[in-house]
Amino acid sequence: MRKVLLLFIAIELLIALYGAASVNLIAAVAAVGTGGTGTTALVAVAVLGVPTLLMGMTLPVLVIALDRRVGNIGDSTGTLYFINTVGGAAGAFASGLWLFHSWTSRRW
């Protein structure tokens, strides 16, 4: 279980590092320019594919860790996906009702 949690921490740290570097990376890619729609799509996939892959790995790794503790893959998967779904809904709800209204610019 310890190795799985260390893997989760490593993935989260890589996401954070990529996030910190992404501003400069995206600016560098934009400065170079691209040769058309297909090239732009390939560059976008290359730049955003790494963090997307890493973020997609986090919940399955947590499922493995919880399964080793609980011993039932169905309960582990269901519990974590439920928590993930509730968190996503709460974030969407908060951003729609509170953040959107508090962070909008004033009309002149």
Image: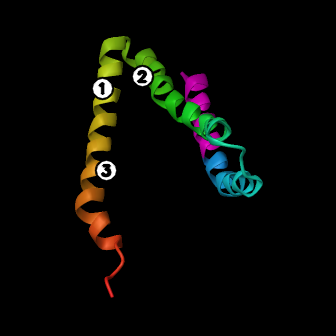
Quadrant (top left, top right, bottom left, bottom right) of the C terminus: bottom left
- Residue 19: image location, x then y, percent: 61, 50
For the residues marked 1 and 3, what is the alpha-carbon distance in whole angstroms?
Answer: 18 Å
- At horizontal 72% and vertical 44% (from top left) the residue drawn is 35
Neighbourhood count class around disc 3 (C-alpha, 10 Å): few under 14, some 14–19, many 20 upward: few
Mark 3 or mark 2, which has the lower sequence index? 2
- Residue 36: image location, x then y, percent: 66, 43
For the residues marked 2 and 1, what is the alpha-carbon distance in whole angstroms?
Answer: 9 Å
Question: Mark 2 touching mark 1, by CB under 8 A?
Answer: yes
Which residue sits furthest front? Answer: 36
Q: Nearer the viewer, residue 69 or 96?
A: 96
Residue 59: give its label: none
Q: Is the magenta stretch mostly helix, strand or loop?
A: helix
For the residues marked 3 and 2, what is the alpha-carbon distance in whole angstroms?
Answer: 24 Å
Mark 1 or mark 3, which has the lower sequence index? 1
Q: Is residue 27 magenta?
A: no
Residue 66: give its label: 2
Magenta stretch in the rendered image: 1-15
Instruction: Determine whether the residue tagged by mark 3 lies in a helix, strand or loop.
Output: helix
Instruction: Determine whether the residue tagged by mark 2 lies in a helix, strand or loop.
Output: helix
Q: Does the magenta stretch include residue 6?
A: yes
- Residue 98: image location, x then y, percent: 26, 64
Q: In this view, does 39 lie above or below 65?
A: below
Q: Can you identify the residue that label 1 sits on?
A: 79
Neighbourhood count class around disc 2 (C-alpha, 10 Å): few under 14, some 14–19, many 20 upward: many
Q: Which of 47 and 75 is in front in this view?
A: 47
Name the quadrant containing residue 75: top left
Drawn side of residue 24 relative to residue 67, left or right: right
Name the quadrant containing residue 104: bottom left
- At horizontal 24% and vertical 52% (from top left) the residue drawn is 93
